[in-house]
Amino acid sequence: MALVVNTNISSLAAQRLGVSETLRAQIRSINQATRNAGDGISLTQTADGAAASIGSLLGRMRELATQAASGTVGTTERSYLDQEFVALRSEIDRISTTTEFNGQALLSGASNTFSVFVGFKSGTGNSLSVALDDLDVASVGLTGASVSTAAAAQAVLSNIDGAISSVATARANYGSIQSRFDAAIQNLTVTAENFTAADSRIRDADIAQETSLFTRNQILTQSGIAILATSQNAPQHSAVRNHIEERVPEPKSSGGEVTKKELDQALARVREVFQKADSRVEFSVDPELGRVIVKIMDGESGTVIRQIPQQEVLDLAKSLEAPTGLLLHHKA
């Protein structure tokens, strides 16, 4: 016998089978919802990475505007600064329009709002809405911005500050959305573990019970083998029987009353001698007949070899040289 998973599902009650199948279907849906939430995290991380790049560009643009606003910069030098400023502004537009996830734009356009399904049933509360802010030049208020003159450079500083604030707000939004996805994943993971445990209690083997049955069957099998081996050793019984016949004389009439103490002492001596020949030899006393019953025990059954009068036991004990310090437990 081996410990196995209960694959004989037809033996289960129909209701329990239905519950198990429903749990398994829901577990698969939960696992997919967990992957959906993971995709949501990837989406927000992609958007956040692009926003971080835009923020870095805005920082450089503010640095250029600050430099161009100074009167120590000549017209030619200021034009160089303006060229870099305009190039960075164009790069912001390029990043915002090309950042996408699975072919969907994230930082510009009208399609950067997503609903991520993180449940395993229909209805409200099973989706998380992700609304991403546009971060293109027009959305952050830098359309046509330049640092071609000192006055323009000073004026654009406030616009750049507004753009930096917009990017920071967008990144904070991405972080909060990602935290919700993390919480959803933790909840889905715990739910899947509990559903799996419930399904296991229905379908899988009870290891403690199966181990107990396995041990019980092993004992029964080994006992059966032992009894079979004993039955095949029948000549040994004959040898013990002949040994007892030789050592125990035929019953003869008792010449007097036998006391319990005398019988106990005598039987202890006889018992020790015969049990050395075969440990299965047992003795019991029949008080009504005044006889000692000698048996060979085979498992739960016993074969009576001889019935000896109590007086003969006393006589036999006197002829045996055996220790007298043994205790006899017999059925009175």
Image: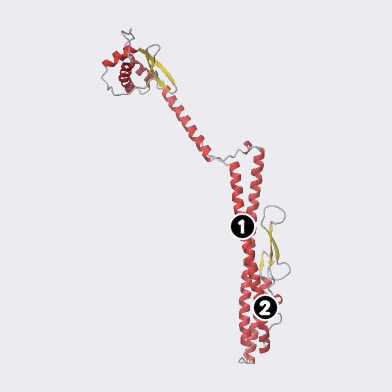
Tell me: residue 29, above or below residue 60.
above
Left-right relation of 36 to 308: right
User: Label 2, on which residue?
Assistant: 162
Instruction: Indicate which disc residue 118 carries.
Output: none
Q: Amino acid at mark 2?
A: Gly
Marks 2 and 1 sit apart, C-alpha to C-alpha, by 35 Å
Q: Residues within 10 Å of mark 2 (few under 14, many from 20)?
A: some
Rendering coords of residue 173 (x, y %): 65, 68
Secondary element at image label 2: helix
Q: Residues within 10 Å of mark 1 (few under 14, many from 20)?
A: many
Residue at figure coordinates x 61%, y 57% from the top left:
185
User: Label 1, on which residue?
Assistant: 185
Rendering coords of residue 116 (x, y %): 68, 60
**Between discs 2 and 1, the one toward the N terminus:** 2
Q: Amino acid at mark 1?
A: Ile
Left-right relation of 16 to 260: right
Query: Viewer-proximal residue, 115 or 162?
Result: 162
Residue 87 visible in the shown view:
yes
Tell me: residue 187, above or below residue 92.
above
Query: Viewer-proximal residue, 246 or 15?
Result: 15
Rendering coords of residue 257 (x, y %): 33, 10
Screen quadrant of the C terminus: top left
Tell me: residue 66, above or below residue 29.
below
Query: Viewer-proximal residue, 108 or 275?
Result: 275
Secondary element at image label 1: helix
Rendering coords of residue 237 (x, y %): 38, 19
Left-right relation of 2 to 148: left
Query: Viewer-proximal residue, 35 or 257?
Result: 257
